[in-house]
Image (tube, helix red, strand yellow):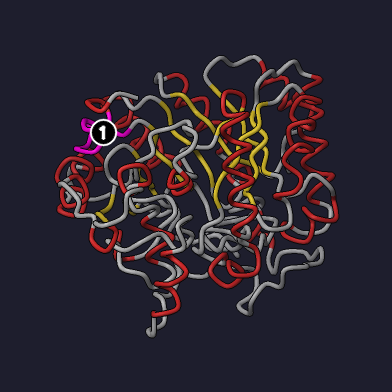
Amino acid sequence: MTASLTAQFAGGLSAPICLTWELTYACNLSCVHCLSSSGRRDPRELSTAQCQAVIDELARMQVFYVNIGGGEPTVRPDFWDLVDYAVAHQVGVKFSTNGLKITPPIARRLAASDYVDVQISLDGATAEVNDAVRGAGSYLTALAAMANLAEAGFAGFKLSVVVTRQNAPQLAEFAALARRFGAQLRLTRLRPAGRGASVWHELRPTPAQQRMLHDWLVANGESVLTGDSFFHLAGYGDGALPGLNLCGAGRVVCLIDPVGDVYACPFAIHESFLAGSACDEGGFERVWRDSPLFASLRAPQSAGACTSCSAYDACRGGCMAAKFFTGLPLDGPDPECVRGHGEAALARTSSAPPRPSPDHSHRRSKVPVTIARRPPDRACDQSPLSGFTAGSG
């Protein structure tokens, strides 16, 4: 990527390249590293009409595509209608799912669309590793979904993996799984956000695994997507990683949550990064273009504590969300800085890190790393409004 293009991205664009939209906090699982602490539906969730109004705005702004997540977005009864509405208005859709609703008929429907992409989440190449994080039975659910997509002829859907200490040795196995189903492997970074804050130290890759991951990405980068998750690894300096290698928060990406609040970063759902609401006057477009928070992020950034580090131009200080949720200053080193500056900074941190986003978990207590299958507390926690009349649940 040219320096001039990087500079243009750093200064912000007239519309986000990719908008992450969490349609619901409802989820049938309780993944221990969930960024949004999902589980229970928020009763203030945007209605179908409000979601359509947001899509209308995105179409006017010429947003290339929207990355829909949650929660488990497919449990919204209007989910497929919203996908159809977006596609009809020339807004491409990529959605992340645990595979719960990807039945053979749905897989055939998806395969027939040129403007919809699917990411199946899987955090272990074996059931033992995956289900310890995502819940009992989730491995088989994901594999069944991938088999249905492959059988329907959906080529190139994504197998999405959050890299952890436990699954980092399985990179080759993930790649083989992707090939088996005609999918493309997508790796993302584990962030200490949401429920992930309580398990980050336990699940994050070791320094040796970070080095191994870097080398594996350099060797396999053309066939593996990363969502620009690993630019903190660029500090090794001996191999170019694919992607922007720049924090895109408020510049080229942002997030809309289930109630319409707009955050600068999909990994930093916290009031400190709240830029406004898509439901206020002027809608999402006004937030994107006029938010003081976004303006500050688009301004030239100081290297801060990283000024003297020769790797700064490569890693740009790392991930804003990772720093924030570990209590490090935003102009300090990434907590997983490959030069070791992050570990030293963490050792000097005396104050408690900020509390993660509001907890929507099925239960209030900490979700253990090994979790068992359990039903939702109420039916509407899993499938919002399904089978209920107004005022029920």
| Residue 329 vs residue 80, the one in the foreground | 329
387 lies above or below 175 = below
Q: Where the C terminus falls, by quadrant?
A: bottom right
Q: Is residue 251 visible?
A: yes
Badge 1 is on which residue? 9
Which residue sits at x=84%, y=53%?
137
- Position of 258 compared to 285: left or right? right
Q: Is residue 262 visible?
A: no
| Residue 22 vs residue 189, the one in the foreground | 189
- Position of 116 compared to 256: left or right? right
Residue 364: name its quadrant. Answer: bottom right
Magenta range is 6-16
Which residue sits at x=79%, y=30%?
176
Which residue sits at x=40%, y=18%?
90
| Residue 372 vs residue 12, the one in the foreground | 12
339 lies above or below 78 = below
